[in-house]
Amino acid sequence: MRVMILGGDGYLGWPTAMAFRNAGYEVCAVDNYLRRRIASETNSDALMANPLLPERAALFERLTGGEIEVAVGDCCDFDFLSGLVRTFAPDVVVHYAEQPSAPYSMMGYDEARTTLSNNLIATFNAVWAVMRHAPACHIIKLGTMGEYGTPDIDIEEGWVEIHHKGRSDRFLFPRQAGSLYHTTKVLDTDLLWFYVRIHGLRVTDLMQGPVYGLSTDEADLDPQLMPNFHYDDIFGTVVNRFLVQAAAEVPLTVYGKGGQTRGYLNIRDTLQCIALAAANPPAPGELRILNQFTETFSVNQLAERVQRVGRHMGLRVDVQNIDNPRKEMEEHYYNPAHHGLIELGLEPHVMTDEVVAAMLEQVLPHRNRIAVERILPRVRWR
Ligand code: USQ
């Protein structure tokens, strides 16, 4: 099997590339370093310096003997992407090549436009490149649980049966995202559904919650193979931020009341989910939607847990409720379904105190690199 990873330099893209290669797939990792560039422009560089893709791939090959092909270029450039799909002939395209930060997308016009155009055109080009050169290829697209928002009803796995005036039909579950970034993922889903309906593509759209952690089988081989780990307010996600804040003994930044509840997963489970999706493709003409998380937590529950474990390790960890920079519900109903990946064989790594302690142990050696001015929110929704 041949897998092309779009966004192969990212927090998830690089670990995914290594995991597929170790599982025996031929792998091509594609990236234009957009996230590195905008993280540097916003003073949001990752905690540890990560080598560029060719260097990472060369190191991985030295350590494992497995070759990862690297292509540096922009998925928004159709000639580049379609040429690559034609020559590499993938069986699976994993599409992560999106501007991934909700706060970045809310900074101003330029950042919003970059997010909108990058995310939608990358998806559009991936669809067209596959239709032209590899029509049987399975597209695995990373969506987000944030597409659904926080409705006051149970969230289904992508689809819902609607009964209306004595008739019924199946539709995409209603979506109402809370940032422009999350909205681009809603638009991606609509775009994919259109091309699946009309052209019979086979697509898996994974509605993923916030991911945490920095340990995978391959990343653990060498510090230079670690995923890029952000803790700033723009590219860092909440669990990773809390770990770094605890390590720096800076109060944990709970936004608002802290009742915001989301579905979380360990980075190891992201890798499992992608592997399971790839090994079990949907039929041509099917848009399969899977909710990709293993456990739900409120922000307060996460903060309590990191505080408890951090204190146990001798760290001075306080929790501070700060003015919420986002426009979101701080107390709400949240009950999303997530059966599909479990049925495919996902075995969750749940967030025990031991897991939190192990993540803190990985962060602590880097504590003198933590720039505390990147911790408090610098972007407001309004
Ligand atoms: N939050 C805090 N304190 C912080 C950081 C975040 O209370 O210091 C809160 C946020 O207000 C939010 C929740 O934690 O209610 C999650 O925020 P996040 O920054 O971890 O996640 P989010 O911005 O929603 O985006 C992240 C990824 C994105 C992915 C998404 C999944 O950056 O790529 O799509 O998680 S989900 O959240 O389910 O939409």
Image (cartoon, rainbow, N blue to C red):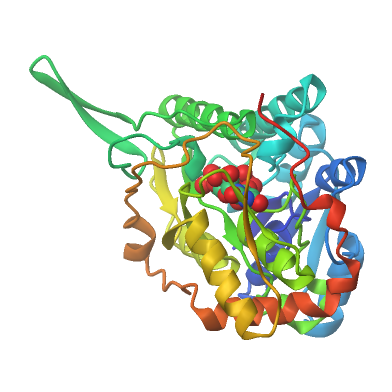
Q: Nearer the viewer, residue 206 or 144?
A: 144
* Residue 246 point in image, percent of width and height: 70, 69
* Residue 91 point in image, percent of width and height: 58, 53
* Residue 71 point in image, percent of width and height: 84, 51
Determine the residue positioned at 57% across, 31% down: 327
In the image, farthest residue toward the top: 165
Determine the residue positioned at 70% across, 61% down: 251
Residue 140 showing in the rendered view: no
Residue 261 showing in the rendered view: yes
Q: Nearer the viewer, residue 107 or 176?
A: 107
Occupied quadrant, residue 56: bottom right
Determine the residue positioned at 67% across, 24% down: 382
Determine the residue positioned at 32% across, 37% down: 159
Occupied quadrant, residue 3: bottom right
* Residue 200 point in image, percent of width and height: 44, 33
Decide if residue 120 is on the left or right side of residue 187.
Answer: right
In the image, farthest residue toward the left: 166
